[in-house]
Image (cartoon, rainbow, N blue to C red):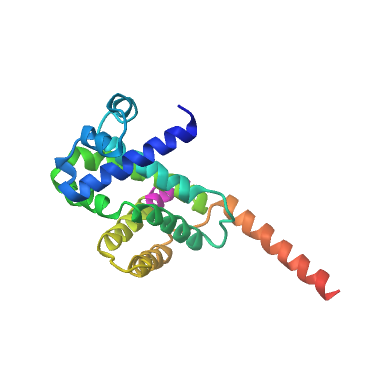
Amino acid sequence: MTDIDREEFDLALLEAGFTLAADKGWHRFSLVEAAHRAGLAVDEVRARFAFRHTLLLRLGRLADESAFRDDGLGGSVRERIFDLFMRRFDVFQQYREGIRAVLQALPTEPGLAVILGAATLDTMRWMADLGGIDRSGFGGAMRLNALVGVWGFALRAWEKDESPDLSQTMAALDQALDKAERYGALKPSPDRLMEEATRNTGIADHSLELET
């Protein structure tokens, strides 16, 4: 199976799985049902998705791939984090009702909550580094926890957001980032500060060239 075949395979199973979750609830469907719905061989599904929660991990990775794609991400730390989070929500939106079914099931499935919590923390580490947040020392650990909190607050808003443009989600994310910024949770890393200084120097030099 080529990489393209694997991607198409995974997308087909994700679509089937989350559609079933939306229709029946996260607890009430099986990967065999998802395989049949997607028209995929059960043995191949078993080889790639051993457990139902693997669907969630694969979706998380898909959302990360979309968020982390290097296509001119710029601006301040706050602007970067906002863009990264909204890119993830754009992917989640494609599986909206199924993900909502998962969120509703979390209180009764602590094992799943632990797995998703660990995956979310790992994603937030990448988000923090790509966004340019200082993760050094004890303060860095606190800032990472704050970023997890921002994501959780925005996720709860997204779960209830029925607007076509996710305006309520963006407003909640803005609110959470405002609070995080006030408490120093978006402190730029040394590399990010150097990058900003270099860019600002380049802009200043260019302005001087235009003036002369």
Q: Residue at x 33, y 25 (%)?
A: 47
Image location (x, y in percent) of residue 106: 19, 47
Residue furthest to the right in view is 212
Q: Is residue 122 visible?
A: no
The quarter holding residue 207 reads bottom right
Image location (x, y in percent) of residue 129: 50, 48
Q: Residue at x 27, y 50 (%)?
A: 99
Q: Quadrant of the N terminus?
A: top left
* The magenta stretch spans residue 143: yes
Image location (x, y in percent) of residue 135: 46, 48
Considering depth in this image, is 26 or 116 the residue closer to the camera?
26
Q: Which residues are magenta?
A: 135-144
In the displayed structure, does residue 7 sit left or right of residue 164? right
Residue furthest to the front in view is 39
Q: Is residue 48 visible?
A: yes
Indicate whether 139 appears above or below 112: below
In the displayed structure, does residue 211 sit left or right of residue 69? right
Indicate whether 51 appears above or below 113: above
Q: Quadrant of the C terminus?
A: bottom right
Helix, strand or loop: magenta stretch: helix
* The magenta stretch spans residue 139: yes
In the displayed structure, does residue 129 sit left or right of residue 30? right
Q: Residue at x 45, y 33 (%)?
A: 5
